[in-house]
Image: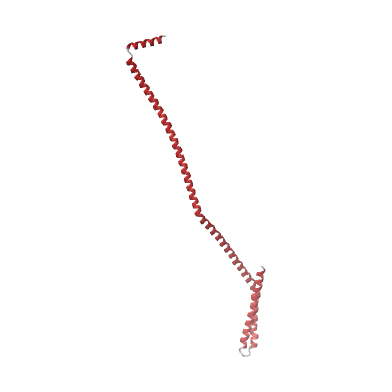
Amino acid sequence: MGKIKMNKTMINFALLAMSVIFVLGFTGVTFASSDSGGHGGGNHWLQVDTWKVLNFAILAIGGFLLLKKPAADFFSSRKKNIKDEITALEQKKADAQKQLAEYQDKFDNLDKESKKIVENYIKQGKEAETRIIEEAKAQADKLEDMAKHTIKQEFKSAKAKLQLEIAQKAIKKAGEVIKASISSDDQDKLVDQYLKKVVA
């Protein structure tokens, strides 16, 4: 803050010095041009041009003093605005660089992420394949057990039917053999024995 105040003081001093040098230089040039005429009009210059130069000097100094504060404020506010704009632009630049870095990181990680996703899908596919195979195997084992049980039941049923059929044929055959081997006297004896048992 002190440095800025010192710079303003130096600028004011330089402007005042330049104004004085300009006025003196302008006066010297005018005086020299009036002397070089050789008409003895130096006195005329002193009466007319001196008032013009003084009027101009007073007007210039007055204008300088009147415009010094608004001009300083204008340039100060302009400087502040430019500084604020530069700060805002630098902040935007920093934000853009940060966002660019984030996008670059995302882009760099995109390949890794895609590989990770593919590996995850492959893993899930293998797990599903294993689960499906295990379920199919369990289903096949269940169907095999059911088939074995059904075959066993069918075998028992067929065996029972066959035994019944054999027994029926054996009885029939035995009846035929007995019929052929028993005579009519034997039949009469058997009937008599049966009647005795019933009566008794």
Of 140 and 12, which appears nearest the observer? 140
Q: Is residue 58 above or below residue 136?
A: below
Residue 37 drawn at (x, y percent): 61, 89
Residue drawn at x 42%, y 32% is: 148
- Residue found farthest to the right: 2
Q: Is residue 172 above or below residue 107?
A: above
Q: Is residue 176 above or below residue 110?
A: above
The image quarter in which residue 155 lies: top left
Of 120 and 33, which appears nearest the observer? 120
On-image quarter of the N terminus: bottom right
Q: In the rendered view, does 45 fall on the left or right side of 186? A: right
The image quarter in which residue 179 lies: top left
Residue 70 drawn at (x, y percent): 63, 71
Residue drawn at x 66%, y 71% is: 6
Residue 199 drawn at (x, y percent): 40, 9
Residue drawn at x 50%, y 53% is: 112
Q: Is residue 6 above or below residue 101?
A: below
Tell me if I can see residue 148 in this picture.
yes
